[in-house]
Amino acid sequence: MMAEITVDWIKRWEEIYDGRLRTMQRDYSIDDWSRRAEDYSERRKTNQYEFGENVWSVLASHGVVGNQSRVIEVGSGPGTFVIPFSKHVDHLTAVEPAEGMIRVIRENAREAGIENYDIIPKIWQDVSIPEIQGTYDLVITSTVIWMFRDIMQQISRMEEVTRGHCCVVEGIDSTDALGKKLWHTIMGDIPYPSYPGYPLAYNLLYQSGRIPHVQIINAQSLRTFEKLMTMYRVFYSLYTEFTPKVEETIRSALLADSISGLHERNYQSAVVWWDPKERREIG
Amino acid sequence: MQYNVTGVHQESGSRKTGNGTNMTESIDWKAAWKESVEESGRVSTPGYWDSRACDYAKMVDTSDCDHGRRILNLFRDQKILHDDWDVLDIASGPGALTIPFAERVRSVMAIEPAPRMAVCLMENARRHGLKNIGVIPKTWQEVKETDYEKKFDMVTCCHALWQFPDLLEQVRRMETVSRGYCCLAHGVEVSERELKKSLGVPMDGQDQFNTLFNFLNGEGIYPNVNILEYSLMWPVEAAIASKERFVEKYRPLTKEDQVIIREYISRNTTDGIYKIPGRMGVLWWKVG
């Protein structure tokens, strides 16, 4: 008898989402992302937006985007794809609710001489789909979909706004050794929190009949000590009381990790794209 | 057997956290893969493929090696294909991949244990004027990988993974002989559902691609994935013969089977060619 794999990937997604919330003192707020704007920008700008440029190269080489494309980015943060994509495409719309992030997008765009973009200052769930239905060639998002418990509903909304493709870019085992060690030093036996991403996102799409493609990319982040401290400060304040002792633990670990004052991370991400019009036979 | 989220292969539903973003680790993909291919492997012996050599070779020829060319074109478009490549094609059959690759690269070594398939491959090579193809007349498991350590720029295995219940071990051996890339191709849809249902034979390959994908990811191999459309085109008589041999994998062929097969193929034939559209998942990665 043939084996039958009947994993309910949507349920898995929801379990991870709920599990994360149970571990937290409170969920992320939009203000947390404003506080993260400067340090997140530093990460994305590493090596002249190497991460975004690599994603661009993958999608361009597969004919998913070109210089006539209109692109919408869900949860742009500091301009993850706004800056590296805008110079290649006709127009880019950033959906980003955090004021701090919007300010940084504008600064980064000015710095890069980019003007062919606009910003919808909302969370994705509040964006009115009928107004923009089918007006983009690509909807793209990175490290954002873990915030959607109703993942397939939000994926479907993304599919409605594109007449071309969808793309999600997710980290692979993105928790670095230092991050895990720090967590256990500060949080003890509480297991490290999970964020649903890759390959779970692939499984969701495949199971629902989509035909997703994947390319794995490598990128680097170079962070300064103070900006990395900001990241950890925001992160740990969601999980525990951010005491001077916690701060000192992080500070000591980071100082030991520094190379010439910078903190270097090499990471892998999965670029997953699909054409919503294409479906495979299920069952 | 089912691997269910509430079953024994999964951790408690109250689990709060996990390791990073990969929450597929609690499913025993290795066991799932082994079980899913055991039946295919049991019935698809080198003897079976020897009996299929003639009809399969006609299909590959009529299709102009369509699925192999599409894989080749993927690597060409990704700008990783080089004319000085040495390629290893595991379970080459009559050359659906071997022929188009040999037209573009320095050499292709084909591994093919079925004698008549190997003869078809070499005849095919002669017809295409190719002299850069060699054949190792063994199964991949019989090949001593240390004899070929880092000898190939690309190692392919297309539509033949069903022969590896111990997939990971065989994939690691492929990595041993590769100094460049590995590529596994596998169908993502069951072809000819209606026919198989009428004949009461198994829907080979259902869910295997997804199991393969998760198995590799769970073992820390993160392949690129491209799902490609392709067409298999059969001369009618070769199509009929292939379906009859397929039924005989599982049970003796009856007159009723023959009627069902001929009617089905007749209904789906145009200008003497029986065409099956399909999709394959191409998993490929650079060897570290």
Image (spheres, coloured by chain):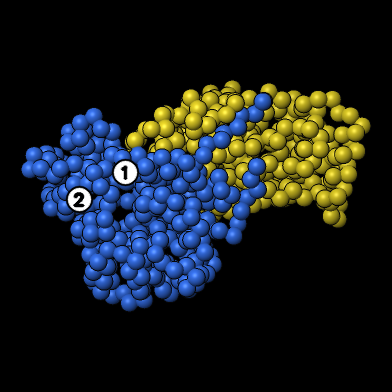
Chain colours: A blue, B yellow
Nearer to us in this view, A128 or A95: A128
- Quarter of the image for residue B135 reads top right
Q: Residue at x 12, y 40 (%)?
A: A246
Nearer to us in this view, B212 or A193: A193
Q: Which mark is residue A234?
A: 2
Residue type highlighted by circle 2: Val
Nearer to us in this view, B20 or B191: B20
On the image, the x and y values in percent for residue A139 come to 45, 63
* Residue linked to disc 1: A21
Residue type highlighted by circle 1: Leu
The answer to whether residue B37 is seen in the rendering is: yes
Q: Nearer the viewer, mark 2 or mark 1?
A: 1
The answer to whether residue B284 is seen in the rendering is: no
On the image, the x and y values in percent for residue B288 come to 40, 38
- CA distance for labels 2 and 1: 16 Å
Q: Which mark is residue B151?
A: none
Q: Residue at x 71, y 50 (%)?
A: B277
For the residues tagged 2 and 1, is the chain the same? yes
Instruction: Left or right? Give the position of A274 relative to A38.
Output: right
**For the residue carrying disc 2, how many other residues have a C-alpha within 10 Å: few (<14), some (14-19), or many (20+)?**
some
Q: For mark 1, give the secondary structure.
A: helix
- Quarter of the image for residue A109 reads bottom left
Instruction: Left or right? Give the position of A50 relative to B178.
Output: left
Which is more N-terminal, label 1 or label 2?
Answer: 1
Q: For mark 2, give the secondary structure.
A: helix
